[in-house]
Image (tube, grey):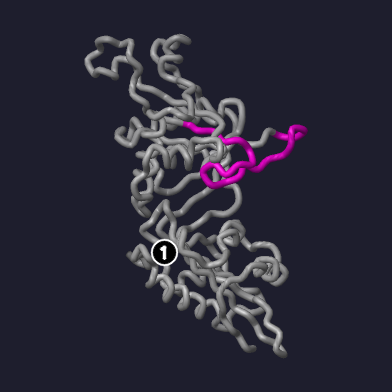
Amino acid sequence: MAIEYREWREGDDLALLEIWGGPETVQAGQFRGTLAPSGNAPWRRCIVAEDVVDGVAIPVAAAVVHEASLHPERLWAYIEVARDHRRAGIGSTLLTMLRHEAAKSPSGVSKLRCKVEPGTPGAAFAEAAGMAPIQRSRLIIVDPAPLKLPVFGDGSESAASDQVEDLATGSVELSDVVGRYYTAVHTWDSPGELSVAMVQRLFLDDLSGAHGAIVLRAPKASAFGHGIAASRKGRLEGFAISYAQGTPGTGADADGTGSAGPAAPTEVFLGHEPKLGEDEARAAVRDLLALIAYQHPVMLELDDAMTALRAVVEPLLETGKAHVQGSETLVVADPA
């Protein structure tokens, strides 16, 4: 077997697809989309390995490393080798080449990260390369009516409308809380500075697939803290952003049957004001989940770092009122 290495060229995706077949994991399917010609805006280096037989070169593996505007403290990396060419040192050679390229990245960042599925060859390769998990993520389907509906204030419709509000996704107030929450639950892989415009683009505008937002507010009196002038809205304590089915949203496509079958779950990004205490955060998330999943199933992307959401959802998993869709995803990275 004579293996040669070169830069990615147009048409390599089709040639490799014939050799690779369908992606073995969800993560592989996502990362295949990052294989593209090398460039500097954004910075990316992509390498192809060819098996040369009787003078004919056939692409059998590819690897890419690239910078990211979100989570800029590490570089994303991905390597895939055809099944019949594994355990021949190709993947290790490609990783060495990626690390060589990473050492010259314009940002000065050289540490790598990737997403793998536990128990797969990709996970084993990453572990052998010295990468370790820094986060676990699961897609959770929550069944309808998983929690008792909350009672707000004196239980009247007026009291409920004071605390539960449909809010425009263009709201600066909403963007502020969403951005700070996302940062707070990603201390393990900092997203960098998130401007209101960036939060809008990533989570709230039409291109993100955002369909609507419901927020939970504290009682009106909390706006001043002394129980006076209670006409002012209470502070925003929690949010639930829904995404149109089949759009990227927070990173997962909704999966369900058509209108003739069971209702497809709605993808939701659920979070809270990060300054809340632990009990307050759990209560805010619980109340919103009870409301949004009262009649229809919802799908949540749950990272282990989302402690308040985990505290609410994991008991539902134990009682069968929620279940994990697909396999877990591990974010693995070079040592800090």
**Magenta span: chief secondary structure:** loop
Amino acid type of the residue that numbered disc 1 sits on in the rendered structure: Ala
Q: Position of residue 160 (x, y in %)?
A: 45, 15
Using the image, determine if residue 56 lies above or below residue 59: below
Q: Identify the residue at the far right of this view.
A: 260
Left or right for 227, reference 26? left
Q: Position of residue 290 (x, y in %)?
A: 50, 27
Q: Is residue 142 visible?
A: no
Left or right for 19, reference 75? right
Give the residue pinned by disc 1: 333
Using the image, determine if residue 153 lies above or below residue 91: above
Left or right for 264, reference 291? right
SS at mark 1?
A: strand
Quarter of the view holding residue 171: top left
Give the extent of the magenta segment.
Answer: 240-262
Using the image, determine if residue 132 lies above or below residue 142: below
Q: Residue at x 61, y 74 (%)?
A: 61
Quarter of the view holding residue 280: top left
Taking the magenta stretch, the answer to whether it contains residue 42 is: no
Quadrant where the N terminus sits is bottom right
Q: Is residue 113 visible?
A: yes
Q: Residue at x 50, y 33 (%)?
A: 241
